[in-house]
Amino acid sequence: MQLRVLRTTTGALLAGAGALMAAASWQRWAGVCGWGDVDSAGCLERQDHRYDVLAPAAPWEPVGIASELAGASLLVLAAALVLLPWALTGRRPGPVSAVAAAGAAVGSAAMGVTALGSGLSGEVVEPVGGDVTIWVWLLLTPVVLVHLAVLAHGWRRTAAVLLVLGAPPVALFSYAMGPYDARPWWEAVSGLLVVAAGACVVGAGPAGRRPDGAGSSPASSTSRAGREEVPTHPVR
């Protein structure tokens, strides 16, 4: 029951984080870039990195509340990262896994505060810790998710793989890169992958389920075998 509540909570956090990132993408691209459109004048202009919603760098211009939504998404994702090792593996993480997950969560939260603060102030806010924070976020988050993908099984492994693909640090070096600067709607792709991962976490079956008899002790197995070998005779 405790694990079910944990997974439901983690899945809800992931779904919320993904939905917020998709909403941020809508704020940035809707009205200037149709789905699949990359060549119109308005769309070309919006692809410029000065409109980025994550890790903004000067010169930078906010678009609606896109950065606020993206920042909130990373903050919610940070909360999910704290619970994720237990939710995906079905057991409490060891010290190394716990510290790594906590580091990834701190990096995500720091970048979320940066994006949120930039959007609210209308100017670039540097992350606490500067470039170190950015590199922790870029490198540690994918490592933690890949490690969990190796440890998890079934739908939980699927969730971890989707999170790897949807992680902003992974996206920024792959499908977020467009023919000019940023690829239109990449944040929505990332968000939908995270939403799907949340659904997989909620729908995952109990961890540690073993085939019938796999968890039986040798004594109980011997006892059953002994009972099966003792012949029964009719009562006279």
Image (tube, grey):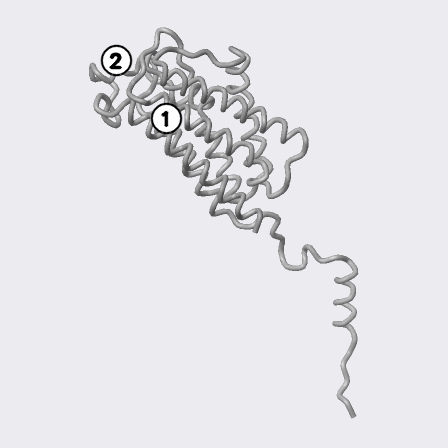
In this figure, which residue is indicated by the disc labeled 2? 45
The amino acid on which the numbered mark 2 sits, given as a three-letter code, is Glu
In the rendered image, the quadrant that contains the C terminus is bottom right
Q: Residue at x 54, y 26 (%)?
A: 105
Residue 83: in sight, yes or no? Answer: yes
Q: Which mark is residue 69?
A: 1
Across and down, in percent, residue 11 comes to 47, 40
Taking the view exactly as shown, the residue that stands out farthest to the bottom is 236
Residue 23 lies in what quarter of the image? Answer: top left
**Mark 2 falls on what kind of element?**
helix
Q: Residue at x 71, y 58 (%)?
A: 216
Residue 180: in sight, yes or no? Answer: no
Q: Give the mark, 1 or 2, whose residue is nearer the N terminus.
A: 2
Q: Which mark is residue 172?
A: none
Across and down, in percent, residue 18 comes to 40, 33
Most foreground residue, 169 or 174: 169
Most foreground residue, 130 or 217: 130
